[in-house]
Amino acid sequence: MLRIVPIALLIAVGVAAWIVWRRERLRRQITLATAEFARRRPTLQEDFRAAANVSGKPRGLRWKSCDFQDQLTLARDRANGQLIGLAGATIAFEAVAGGGMEQVEAVDNLRAATAILTWSGHEWTTTGKAAFNLEPQEVLQRYRESLAAIPA
């Protein structure tokens, strides 16, 4: 009986230390990720636009420009724990010659979207995925089963 108490105490201290370590690690990652987004925002915008252009969506349109908002909303992917960045964006398209959209007047309208970025642990990456007509907080709400909000 005497040996059980110290072992249980050691386990409890170990679990508490692990929890504190995980929280501190997440806090450092958030600080680094936020600073890296601010530092590389112009490059990330271009990387996002280029990746989205490769997708061919929307059909008949080319991604002309993409401007991120200053604020980055952070979330954690519930499936793999990866840090996700949600950046409000204003996107401009232009019609592709022969794509069937040249006569559509709405092509020139700016579109609101949320750009989805992934933190690799030391840099932001993107596949050009966007959630159109949704602000970052709306993306968090809509995908709450797969994304956990990280308080600012």
Image (tube, grey):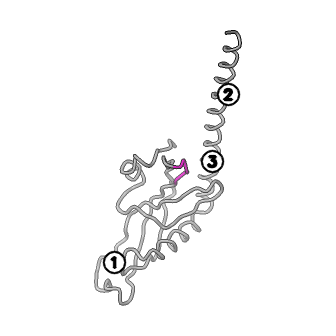
Q: Decide: is 9 above or below 149.
A: above
- Which tag is nearer the camera, tag 3 or tag 1? 3
Tell me the amino acid under the disc marked 1. Answer: Val
Real-space Cα separation, disc 3 to disc 1, in angstroms: 39 Å
Pointer 3 and pointer 1: residues touching (CB < 8 Å)? no
In the structure shown, which secondary structural element does the residue marked by tag 2 occupy? helix
Q: Is residue 82 magenta?
A: yes
Real-space Cα separation, disc 2 to disc 1, in angstroms: 58 Å
Residue drawn at x 35%, y 86% as measured from the top left: 99
Q: Residues within 10 Å of mark 2 (few under 14, many from 20)?
A: few
Q: At which x and y percent is residue 58? A: 37, 74
Residue with the mark numbered 1 = 107
Q: Residues within 10 Å of mark 1 (few under 14, many from 20)?
A: some
Residue drawn at x 57%, y 62% as measured from the top left: 125
**In the displayed structure, does residue 84 sit left or right of residue 22?**
left
Real-space Cα separation, disc 2 to disc 3, in angstroms: 22 Å
Instruction: Kindly identify which numbered label has been placed on residue 14.
Output: 2
Q: Decide: is 7 above or below 18.
A: above
Instruction: Name the one closer to the observer, 84 or 68.
Output: 84
Pointer 2 and pointer 3: residues touching (CB < 8 Å)? no
Q: At which x and y percent is residue 38? A: 59, 58
Majority SS type along the magenta span: loop
Q: At which x and y percent is residue 3? A: 71, 13
Residue with the mark numbered 3 = 29
Q: Which residues are magenta?
A: 80-84
Q: Residues within 10 Å of mark 3 (few under 14, many from 20)?
A: some
Tell me the amino acid under the disc marked 2. Answer: Gly
3 or 1: tag closer to the N-terminus: 3
